[in-house]
Amino acid sequence: MTMIEDDEKFLTNNQGVRINDDQNSLKVGARGPTLLEDFILREKITHFDHERIPERVVHARGSGAHGHFQVYKSLSHYTKARFLNDPTLKTPVFVRFSTVAGSRGSSDLARDVRGFAVKFYTDEGNFDLVGNNMPVFFIQDAMKFPDLIHAVKPEPHNEIPQAASAHTTFWDFISICPESMHTIMWLMSDRAIPRSLRMMEGFGVHTFKLINSEGKSFFVKFHWKPLLGVHSVLWEEAQMISGKDPDFHRRDLWEAIDSGAYPEWELGVQIVEEKDEFNFPFDLLDPTKIIPEEMVPVERIGKLTLNRNPDNFFAEVEQVAFHVGNIVPGIDFSDDPLLQGRLFSYLDTQLLRLGGPNFHELPINRPLAPVYNNQRDGLMRHTINKGKVSYGPNTLRGNYPREAHVGSERAFSSSRQQLSGDKIRDRSKSFFDHFSQATLFYQSQSEAEKNHLVNAFCFELGKVDVLSVRERMVKLLMRVDQRLAACVASELGIDSAKLTVGEELLNLSVPADADPHAYQPITPPALEGRLKTSAALSMANTIKSTIATRRVAFLIAEGVNERFVEAMKSNLSAAGAVVSIVAPRLGEIKGSGDKEIRADFSLLTTSSVLFDALYIPGGIQSAHRLAQDERAILFINEAFTHCKAIAADNEGVTLLMTSGVGDFLNSKKEGEIDPEKRKEFMEGVLMNTDIKEGEESSSAHHFIKLIMQHRFWKRENRT
Ligand code: HDD
């Protein structure tokens, strides 16, 4: 039990008055009416009535954690930011991950972009890197943001659907917004359904600037690379997890940190010299473009570790206020028009959400660097500023606090930039190549990823109830990739041969006074010519060398061979996996040698979709009992269908053969299915039938290798 301090022992009201009865209101007689005088009741109820604050207009659903960031070696050549200069410094951070479209209570597994917002509490002030798990964004100008969000949020007449882009208004908007096409590829890819928040990449998206102590500036793109690799679940699983455990990602993050398996990411930078600004076949200021890693490699410069769960969700995760405008000396903005608009939006939204201008004083938002200025008062002011001087310059207080010098006193100053131009509402023509990076992304995917992407389009557009919207989307996809468009069209019952990519489509969202030709997308040959694929864009190329924190279910019943259970558990646990015993009921399960094994979950309280892999140990009785239990068979079938690693020993194999795995192996007559193909489909399934009495399963080592692979996508093609 936690130690309770003396002054925490007694219940008080908010004025510190100790309360002797917190169960009953003040009444006239035990059955009489309650008195208005009851200040204790009124205070308690009033506070409760005011517990909610407006949820974030986007990114309402989130989870957060504390940690620290440390740079590997000084980056002083590029930036004077102290936290990037001193490898001995551990900068505290708070990170909030989120989905975008759903409300606070929505499922973690929505198909959506994930927010990846990091607050660095540096000793030179707070730096917020408010990024996403996708490196590009839907729109190029902040002016369109409210429309994008209105389109994706539940439709306003009936507030349906929750946390889903699969509906008509979203695709209506997208179908006349060709600039969104690159991000749409990411959204329809498996990146939008991560296995874990700890297994996502993060991106600052915009091009930012780094400035060194000589005042020289560099363009920079920020990346977060997870040390556990980048992994996703299947869309069918995502939908099932949403029902079985809508807090799946939140729980996963919490449990990993709680168990000491601290999530880690490396911070990467792509640096571009100012002189090279125009040497790319796209515009560095365009947030719908990546800089392919083949063009500018990502330099890994430091590590982020999350090692502490919040103490209180509301005070920390809900009240944390990120702002792209929070930067420190040595970092600066570029002129990306999306970023420029964001610079207004974040401060503005916090004023409403957190109820006034003093939200920076909330503990989670308070910088570690001291704050001194002449800002005063306002709702919920915490600081008690002393003295009569609240202005500057002043003479009455020796002109303190005064401005600091940029060099020796480490003040912030904007990077120097020469600008001139007409005051116009316009967009640069260099932003109008909307398709070549969408194509690059699609072409860079593995076969399995491409299939998932096609399926995602079919699902999403299949939920659209206006035919012309579906057709417009197929037309746009034809510009990305003909095969992709044809597959989607066929599933939607559209004859793509009859469609042309008409100019009218691309002009639908052009402003009234614009020259429509100026808005025509362009495809510069340079990118197409040089780069057909980029390896970093496919998750198939991610790290597959660890099973740390992978969840493995052991399916057991009474009479299980406990030696198999113990041996496999100790091997997997030693490799960092999290083993859970799943049995028909909770409580102690007696093994064949009379040892008892405690079940972590019953077949009623868990499901295969909540695990990464499945082990079925031997034991005649256990296998027999489970073979009679259709929940156990469903568990196995789902693990197989979702392409997971499965290992079975001795009678465990017999059980496996009574499930769909056996059906698959037996149903096809010899010769009907190419043996090589059959082998491919069975990859990831490990069957060990002849372990002698007294021997341990020798399959652990092999099983670990399989779990590392995450999934065996070839199995999807078996039907
Ligand atoms: Fe935004 C929240 C990321 C474009 C306006 N945004 C928000 C969060 C993330 C992002 C991660 C959640 C922060 C948290 O956990 O509290 N947003 C992005 C990225 C964008 C982007 C990577 C494009 C590159 N956002 C964007 C635009 C605007 C906004 C163009 C408005 C012009 N975003 C907001 C907001 C939010 C927000 C309304 C809602 C809650 C909040 O700020 O604190 O201001």
Image (spheres, rainbow, N blue to C red):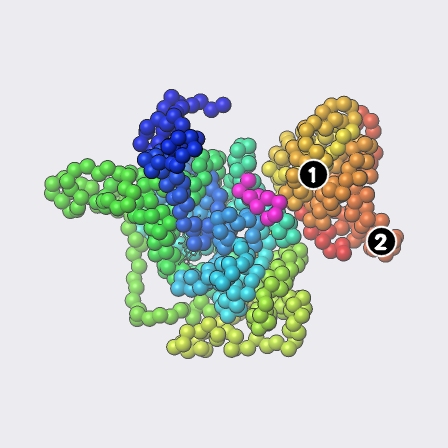
* Magenta stretch: includes residue 244: yes
- The Cα atoms of the two marked residues, 2 and 1, are separated by 30 Å
Return the x and y of residue 305 as percentages of the image width and height: 48, 38
Labels 2, 1: front one: 1
Q: Nearer the viewer, residue 564 or 581?
A: 581
Magenta stretch, main secondary structure, is: helix
Q: Badge 1 is on which residue? A: 603
Badge 2 marks a residue whose secondary structure is loop
Rendered view: 501 above or below 651: below
Q: Badge 2 is on which residue? A: 668
Q: Is mark 2 within 8 Å of ligand 1?
A: no
Determine the residue positioned at 58% across, 51% down. 193
Name the amino acid, label 1: Leu
Residue 129 visible at all: yes
Determine the residue positioned at 81% across, 36% down. 624
Residue 405 visible at all: no
Q: Earlier in the sequence, mark 2 or mark 1?
A: 1
Return the x and y of residue 12 as percentages of the image width and height: 36, 29
Answer few, some or many: residues within 10 Å of disc 2's Cα (few below 14, many 20 plus, some between 14 and 19). Answer: few
* Residue 76 relative to residue 716: left or right: left
Q: Which residues are magenta?
A: 242-251
Q: Nearer the viewer, residue 110 or 508?
A: 110
Answer few, some or many: residues within 10 Å of disc 1's Cα (few below 14, many 20 plus, some between 14 and 19). Answer: many
* Magenta stretch: includes residue 339: no
Determine the residue positioned at 38% across, 25% down. 20
* Quarter containing the C terminus: bottom right
Determine the residue positioned at 30% across, 64% down. 419
